[in-house]
Image (cartoon, grey):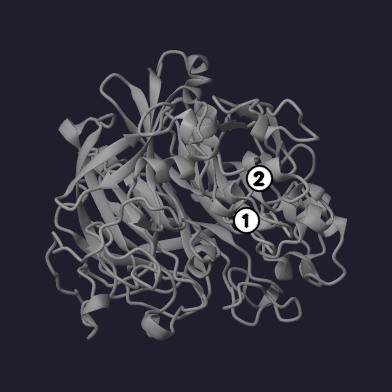
Amino acid sequence: MGKNYSDADTASNHSSADSLAQLLQLRLSRRQLLQGAAIVPFMSLPLGCASVDSRGDSGEIGFKSVSSSTADGVRVPEGYNVGVLYRWGDAIGSQAGMPAFLQGAANSAADQALQAGMHHDGMHYFSLPYGSKNSTHALLVMNHEYTDDGLLHADGFNNWSAEKVKKSQNAHGLSVIEIETRGGRWAVVRPSSYARRVTAQTTIRIAGPAAGHALLTTEGDPAGNAALGTFNNCANGYTPWGTYLTCEENWNGYFVNAGTIPPDQRRYGVTAKGFGYRWHEFDRRFDAAAHPNETNRFGWIVEIDPFTPNAPPVKRTALGRLKHEGAALSLTADNRVVYYMGDDQQFEYIYKFVSRDAYNAADRAANRDLLDHGTLYVAKFDADGSGTWLELSHNKNGLTAANGFPAQADILIRTRQAADAAGATKMDRPEWTAVNPRDKSVYCTLTNNTARGAKDQPGVDAANPRANNVFGHIIRWHEQSGDPAASQFKWDIFAMAGDPLLADTNKRGNVKGDSFGSPDGLWFDPAGRLWIQTDVSTSVLNSGDYAGTGNNQMLCADPVSGRIRRFLTGPKGCEITGITMTPDGTSMFINIQHPGETASERSDPAQPLAVSNWPDGAAADRPRSSTIVIRKDDSGVVGT
């Protein structure tokens, strides 16, 4: 998600874990492409109120598709309107101050710590007060994945300094903002006692089985239980007790190691140059040769309590260390929590975590450490449509001291290596996961993998059946007996992305509806509609295999019929990501990430509007990632 590092990087998984070497007959049918329908331009109109229950929403798709587009704006179906809520640089409303966004990116690092970070990503709506289902007043919590320093600083990377590093670090992490409807429109409440930024400079407690392990100790934290910061926060999750889960994804690219890279760092993608953030020049933690254990303190899921602004965030090590791409929640019959998670890189794995203890709905405080105890699993997909969850526990599935895993903490710090040893199935970049509220089936976007079937790379298999998988696919599974804690499941492929009209059968899709590629964001609304967001890299957008496909988009799928309709197209150069909704279903929040991004994924500070001036138009001097609100003109449920 965000910068498509995983597309370009050589896969770091060189394990000998089983990957079927031949194309097996797909257990899916080829489907026909539907025609697009009417569209309306970007607009912002008054809001209203309605109830999902009173409307009797059946989960069916009730709008006409929009066509693909290369326009520099947000386009939605006829009968819908769009408003901009929260842009990069907007004040969060903290009691500490409310600095305005300055033209020319003139804000200081201290200002940025009190403003919306860059590149909005996953998010969740928490009704106020806690425990209510209020659809007019809430806390909105969202990730800020990464920075484009050509936009963040007036002169980009020129005159690089400690102040620029600090500003970049303060533009990462996440925001907690208070929002409410005013005069029929959504607005950020300023000032707010809840308003908060968590950044790459925030102290975060480390908890769970790996806390205090020798591999997590550093000069600055010899106890190994307090990390400084979180960054590359991509997708997200939430808990039934009202906390937010943010997921550290491409954290490896912030580190550089100009020396001999040890195998464990190499397995997670640490290189000599990193992704070009240059933090290591003024923050020595990011020199992975000098501070090798610092890398082990990232790649975790972080829990944050938005209702308690002074509560420290917590890295929950029991859920494993990956390039985490989301955490989709399910509940067992006895109220244990289950999270499904992808590891976003070519040939990486799909995981789930099952808590040891049940969630206590009557006592919020009793759930404080629930995520520190449980069992981590990794998925193995068999050719006959069955699957097994392989337990990643000490002395199970070869994870013994003799094989390099002397304790459970070692398995959690070296989760990828443990999954290699257990024999998991190498997947085509597992991204977001989503659980169908109607039957608890689970879906996962496999965004793409152009290395599949290439020389010296794993070949196709039943779960990843397309060589040079340019367009990606969506896989789904049903747990045995409908139990999220089961060790066995049945799987199939919900959609092979692409265009079924393409002549090259290897790239032909099976979508029953509007074509799309590089599925990324994935989310079920309460009525059971599946929302799909795309992240086609700007380096290939509207060119090559993606010629004529338009800007990135969001679609809606009916899981029963498989029908897919295009709901939204975004501005030039953007990614569509992050999604949440009010309890009554009448307001949907979406994030528009990196509008105006160029193929190099780094902006020229001398020409910040060369591609896009969204959302502020001609008066702006920079495009700005933003949260938008989508409503129906008749105040009905979005999607109906």
Percent of width and height locating residue 432: 40, 51
Q: Amino acid at mark 2?
A: Thr
Q: Which residue is mark 2?
A: 295
Q: Is residue 387 above or below residue 18?
A: above
Q: Residue at x 32, y 77 (%)?
A: 67
Q: Secondary structure at mark 1?
A: loop
Percent of width and height locating residue 440: 24, 38
Q: Residue at x 74, y 46 (%)?
A: 114
Percent of width and height locating residue 600: 61, 77
Left or right: where does residue 256 sit relative to residue 401? right
Visible residue check, residue 62: no
- For the C terminus, give its image quadrant: bottom left
- Density class for disc 1 (Cα within 10 Å; few <14, some 14-19, many ≥20) is many
Left or right: where does residue 175 sit relative to residue 460? right
Mark 2 to mark 1 CA distance (whole Å):
9 Å
Percent of width and height locating residue 335: 33, 21
Q: Nearer the viewer, residue 48 or 532?
A: 532
Q: Which residue is mark 1?
A: 270
Q: Is residue 210 above or below residue 278?
A: above
Visible residue check, residue 329: yes
Q: Earlier in the sequence, mark 2 or mark 1?
A: 1
Q: Nearer the viewer, residue 35 or 333?
A: 333
Q: Nearer the viewer, residue 531 or 53?
A: 531
Q: Amino acid at mark 1?
A: Val
Please report contact status of discs 2 and 1: CB closer than 8 Å, yes or no. Answer: yes
